[in-house]
Image: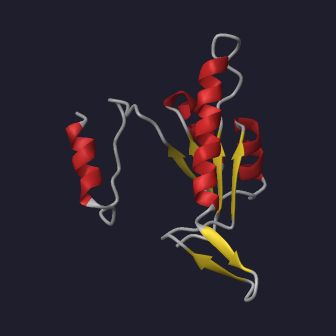
Amino acid sequence: MSEGRLAFVRMGDLGLMGSLVAEVYDNLAESICGHYKSLARVDADKETLNFSAERAFSSVEVVDADTAAKKAQNHEVDILVFLTHSQAEEARAIKKAHRHVKVVIYTGHIPDDEIIWVNKRWPTNILETILASF
């Protein structure tokens, strides 16, 4: 279980042509953020957290890339989730500068030139899904 601080990184300004794409990713970020916020419920009587799933986080928010970098620098975030492979450069830069932060790129596109790491403790169907995508 993690009691870390989690942030989903929304896409930056894509210009006029990309505003619809950015809106889709912003909606995705807010939706996923809402899901992870719901994993922890405060029991007002006991002032303790009751976890309704395997992972719960002390804070969950949606931020832009600049804010993500500042939070990483100030040790105000533990896990950053970028929502598209187009953010890979920003994600790598933050990870390189702030090794303490776990960085995830949640994407439908797995680059051919990258190594894919799979934790043995994850369900085996994840590995099956990855292998089927080749």
- Closest to the observer, 44 or 132: 44
In the image, what residue occupies the spot 64% across and 25% down?
A: 22
Asked if residue 27 shows in the view, the reply is yes
Which residue reaches farthest front? 45
- Residue at image point 57% right, 48% down: 32
Q: How many marks?
A: 0
The residue at the far bottom in this view is: 46
Question: What residue is drawn where x is 59% and y is 29%?
Answer: 24
Q: Quadrant of residue 30?
A: top right
> In the rendering, at what x and y percent does residue 26 appear?
65, 34
- Coordinates of residue 99 in the picture (x, y in percent): 60, 54
Q: Is residue 60 above or below residue 58?
A: above
Q: Does residue 90 appear in the picture of this structure?
A: no
Is residue 49 or residue 101 the one in the foreground? 49
30 or 78, nearer to the observer: 30
At x 74%, y 58%, the residue is 75
Where does residue 96 sit, x and y in percent of width and height?
59, 44
